[in-house]
Amino acid sequence: MTEFAGVTIKKAANIYFDGKVTSRVVTFPDGTVKTLGIMLPGDYEFGTEKPEVMEILAGELTVQLPGSDEWVAVKGGETFEVPGSSKFKLQVASVTDYCCSYID
Amino acid sequence: MTEFAGVTIKKAANIYFDGKVTSRVVTFPDGTVKTLGIMLPGDYEFGTEKPEVMEILAGELTVQLPGSDEWVAVKGGETFEVPGSSKFKLQVASVTDYCCSYID
């Protein structure tokens, strides 16, 4: 799916880490929510309440998932999942375009 | 208007200037197109084919419009217009969230 049709997009961006991470909220007719975002190179820690599926559209990064010491490489075309009520760390190596789906 | 409903959003971002400027394309039911984007601090020159209305949602910048030597300050809540088939320069002072409307 290269585009989302019939959706609602919030105009204002979410801006984190001095703008090095930004995203916009897209709401689907069934009420589900995704964010489309950009991460510039850097090291970040995020927290999430809901479980997430992170689809990397472009870019290169490594992720340390909660409860793991391991850093896993992820690149454009790949996906990783984050459990709810958790924190995870990212090391972004090149400009990363992503789509994050929140799972209810 | 704080959100756009019933629109189509292209999933992949447009990425310029090593990710310091990024945007996503939103298409409306009547075929009109807007981009929602982020600019990090820096100096940029853009070209546009269609006339544009740039609405600054947040941030601070100055703009030099085509044919002018003057730099005009623009900030969140303000708008400027760019004629078609032209180039314009921006000096972005703080992370800037914008909505660009292309005029047919």
Image (tube, coloured by chain):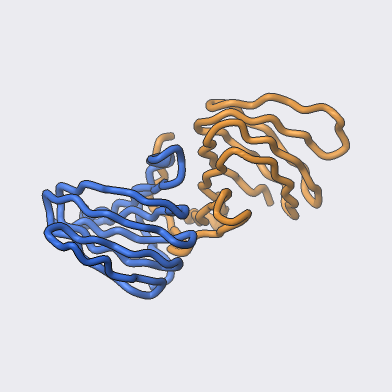
Chain colours: A orange, B blue
Q: In this view, does A19 lie above or below B20?
A: below
Q: In which quarter of the image is residue B91?
A: bottom left
Left or right, B21 with reference to A104: left
Q: Position of residue A4 (x, y in %)?
A: 42, 45
Left or right, A77 with reference to B1: right
Left or right, B43 with reference to A53: left
Front one among A87 and B27: A87
Q: Position of residue A6 (x, y in %)?
A: 38, 53
Left or right, B102 with reference to A80: left
Residue drawn at x 49%, y 59% as measured from the top left: B95
Residue drawn at x 63%, y 35% as measured from the top left: A92
Front one among B32 and A47: A47
**Quadrant location of the N terminus of chain A?**
top left
Q: How many marks are shown on the rendered structure?
A: 0
Task: Kindly give the residue lying farthest to the front in the view shown.
Answer: B69
Q: Position of residue A70 (x, y in %)?
A: 82, 27
Q: Where is residue B43 in the image (x, y as percent from the top left)?
A: 37, 51
Residue drawn at x 64%, y 49% as measured from the top left: A102
